[in-house]
Structures are given as structure tokens and as C-alpha cells.
Amino acid sequence: MRYAKRGRLRFTSHRDISRAVERAVRRAGIPVAYSAGFSPHPKISYAGAAPTGVASEAEYLEIGVTTPCDPEQVRQDLDGSLPPGLDVLDVVAAGSGGLADRLEVSDWEVRLPGADRELAEVAAEKFLAAGTVEVERLTKKGPRRFDAREAVLGLTVSEGTDRPDRTAAQVLGGPCVILRMVVRHMTPAVRPDDVLTGLRLVADFAPPVPPEVTRLAQGPLDASTGALADPLDLDRDTTRGGEAGPASEHVAG
């Protein structure tokens, strides 16, 4: 299933989201399967979870059930049992193949209120022109250096207006530079903040306030079109509605 993490819920940790989903599954009466052993756990697995503080329209999880269920009924029941901001958007019965293996690329939107568009464009050009852009991130095992450039398949700059519901509304209603990043999933994972670090290193570009990051889509990359495909399309029953299409068509839920 695909679910969204919106608004203030983007600050919720993955562990808290897992607890919320488990409680919602019980409240919704979904016949979830449990693992064997002395401490059984519900068979719920998460694929490609976004970092804490990042909103997303394309988070994915799998639930093992003991009896066949109607996907749309599961979507309605589970969505009604979750808190606002955790919204279940799409549910299909799983077929063959692992869901996690299909999540090859993410499409990110990074909103930078108060940033200068021309400087952002120059920084994006320098970043894309660079062969490698090494950044450093603190991990559980200490500082780690890696190339942030290799994973970035696309980086564009546009301009809009800051959202009126922005939580950190330091520049409410002012100009807002919008970066769109298409980033391949690699090890170590390259996150939007790593790309922003790379922009600072190659062009001394840094946003004046903390960015607002949203994952718009994730899925397999269509080699012929360069677009992201919907990872659930391989399982979708087109006889019951829901034609296959690019991942971008499913972003709004």
C-alpha cells in the first residue's frame, strides 16, 4: 500500500509511525498475520521510508493477512483508523516480486523560501557539471564521506510562492525557490539534504531558512521515457479500476 506523511506528521519518527499503523490495523479489524516464535509480531514491513522531518506522498508498506481482503475496503478502514496526516492512498493485493526491489528512484520537491533563483540555477548547473561532489554526513558509525552527484539523475529550478500553511513560516507569502530532484536509490542513500550540501560546496549556495522537503513519488525508472512508474502497477487488477500509469499520476492520491 501507498500512504502519505503530511503536515506536522512529517516530524514523526519511523518507530512512532510503525506503532500508529499497528494500532490502526487492530482498530480496523484487518486480519493481519503474525510471526512465529515466543514474541509474535504483526507481519508489517516498510519499504524506502523517508527521513524524519520530511513529508511524503509516496511511502510504501506491506501487510501480511490471514484471509483474502478487498483492497479498497482495507484502504478505507485503515485510513479511517489512522490520525490525520497519515493517509492511505492506494492498496493492491500483492503479486510476485518484492516491493522494495521496485523502489529504484525518488522524485523530491525541495522548497527554499527566500532563496535567490539565479543563484540556485547557477549552483544546480555547477553541481550537474561536476564529475563528483563529495559530501560528509554523520552516521551511527561516525562521519562518512560519499559522492552525492552520482545518484542525481535530474535537478531543476523553478520559482513559486511560499505556502500559507508552512510550519516554519519565517518568510510567509514571499518568493520561494523550488528544486526538483530525481535521485537514484544507492548505498549509502543520497538524501535531499546531501544534495543541498553539495550545492553549498560547489557554488556557496545555502538557503536562508530550513528547507521544506516532500517526496512526490518513488518507484522503478522507465528507461524509455525517463519517468518514474507506479511500483504497484505490476500488482494492480485493471479489471477492477486503476489503470497503469506513471508514478506522477498517482501523487495526489
Image (cartoon, rainbow, N blue to C red):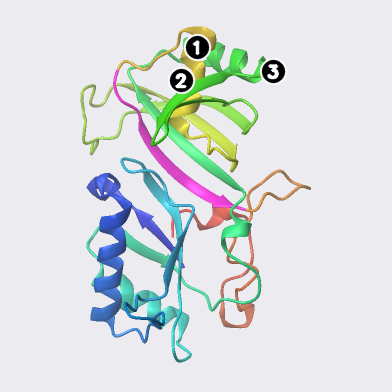
Label tally: 3
Q: CA distance from mark 1 to mark 2?
A: 6 Å
User: Could you say where residue 35 lies in the image, as x and y percent from the top left?
Assistant: 41, 79
Cα–Cα span, label 2 and label 3: 16 Å
Which residue position holds label 1? 201
Residue pictured at 64% horizontal, 20% vertical: 128
Q: Secondary structure at mark 1?
A: helix
Query: Dot 2: within a 10 Å radius of its alpha carbon, few (fewer than 14), some, or many (20 or more) residues?
Result: many
The residue that label 3 is drawn on is 131
Does 217 appear in magenta? yes
The percent position of residue 45, horizontal first and vertical second, equals 44, 66
| Residue occupying the point 76% across, 47% down | 223
Q: Earlier in the sequence, mark 2 or mark 3?
A: 3
**Residue at 60% in and 41% down:** 186
- Residue drawn at x 61%, y 66% is 98
Is 105 situated left or right of 4 in this image? right
CB of mark 2 within 8 Å of CB of mark 3?
no
Give 218 or 96, whichever is nearer the viewer.
96
SS for callout 3: loop
- Regarding residue 120, the answer to whether it shows in the image is no
Q: Which residues are magenta?
A: 209-219
Dot 2: what SS?
Answer: helix
Rendered-image quadrant of the C terminus: bottom left
Mark 2, residue position: 197
Query: In this rendering, would 27 be left or right of 228?
Result: left
* Residue type at numbered disc 3: Gly
